[in-house]
Amino acid sequence: MSKKQEFKSALNVMDGIEQPDQINADAVIKLKAKRPHPLSAGEFVAGIRSGNRTILSKAITLIESSLHAHQQKAQEIINTCLPFSGKSIRIGITGVPGVGKSTFIEALGMYLIPKGHQVAVLAIDPSSTRSKGSILGDKTRMEELAVEPKAYIRPSPSAGSLGGVARKTRETIILCEAAGFDVILVETVGVGQSETTVRSMVDFFLLLMLAGAGDELQGMKRGIMEMADAIIINKADGDNINKAKAARVEYKNALHLYPPAECGWNPVVDICSARSRTGIEAVWDLIGDFTETTKTNGFFDHQRKQQFRQVLTETIDQALKQNFYGRKDIMQAMANFEKEVLSGNLSPYTAAAMLLKINNETAK
Ligand code: GDP
């Protein structure tokens, strides 16, 4: 460009200094390399089997996710882990808030770990959310166990239906077992049906009680005592020891009134102090006795098979219901039929039969 041409226009732009790139390419490459690629189901299983708890936690998060893709991957992981599961003792622990469940679990866990056990602690609390759970949500609980490399504590899945929480916990048990945990403790408080739910996923069900507080006060319905394989009266320490011993006699007598259990195991009543860690060994020994007795007489295996059967039928029940009640056309027809039923023109049985017929004939 000649000098003459150069100043011909007032809009002439001077050449600037070459600017460095706004984005640091090196950093981008490093960042990309650092960002973990999503693990395949096979990588998840390998990680779980090697006892990698970060991967175990991530897999449990997939189980808890409601995203379809996550669910699919979770199912693949669970199915692959299934043959490696089942080799633990699954223990349910219940009792009213304040009875000492977490203190007891910590005491039991800290007793078992030096003996070479690996302990997973899970919880069922449909009322909880991650931020404000009544079980295992409080970080100060189980402080010692929480830092043990041979222990794994997982809070209750965030709020959802009891059925949903139960399913996630069952699946989590499978992964924990595949990861090598041989003692699975499932904690619950007596909220609604949660005890029955925990009972249906464990081998041994332990009820923690307090001496001196009436059964009413402890929210204990007769049914819960009937489900228990052991009733352990906690806080048997200090001035409370004699009261605890008296309560032991009382509960033993109460249990005598129940018909003998089909499993060949008569529920045991005992006392312990989770805080001073006395009586914990005796509880573990009685769980050992239970396992030996029920494995010998076949009940242990029978119960697990029953539980599998129950999960199978419950899952089908749920899917059928979801399929039916989730259909807009059926729900519209139902609203119309309902009017007819309520005005006395149609029997509810006929209406139900007609709706089911529509459902069957137009099944997708
Ligand atoms: P949870 O709500 O059932 O899990 O009960 P916690 O384990 O949180 O215990 C409730 C309270 O009872 C805490 O203050 C514990 O320190 C106390 N506690 C638990 N176990 C014992 C025990 O064996 N003896 C005594 N004296 N106190 C206990």
Image (cartoon, grey):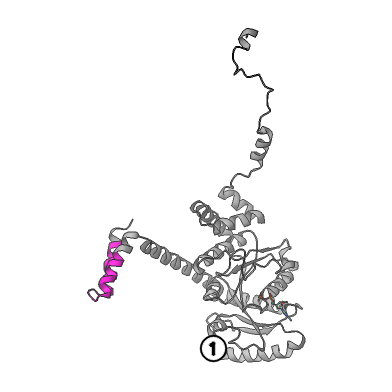
Is 80 or 107 nearer to us in this picture? 107
* Residue extending furthest toward the front: 10
Where's ligand 1: which quadrant? bottom right
Q: Quadrant of the C terminus?
A: bottom left
* Residue indicated by mark 1: 258
For residue 298, say whether it is visible.
no
Helix, strand or loop for the magenta stretch, by majority? helix
Q: Quadrant of the N terminus?
A: top right
For residue 65, say whether it is visible.
yes
- Quadrant of residue 103 in the image? bottom right
Answer above or below: position of 220 versus 355: below
Quick check: 85 left or right of 112? left
Which range of residues does the magenta coloring cover?
333-359
Q: Residue at x 67, y 87 (%)?
A: 211
Is 340 a magenta residue? yes
Query: What secondary structure is found at the residue carrying circle 1?
Result: loop
Quick check: 74 left or right of 103? left
Q: Residue 245 placed where, x, y %?
A: 70, 89
Q: Amino acid at mark 1?
A: Tyr
Q: Residue 203 placed where, x, y %?
A: 58, 73
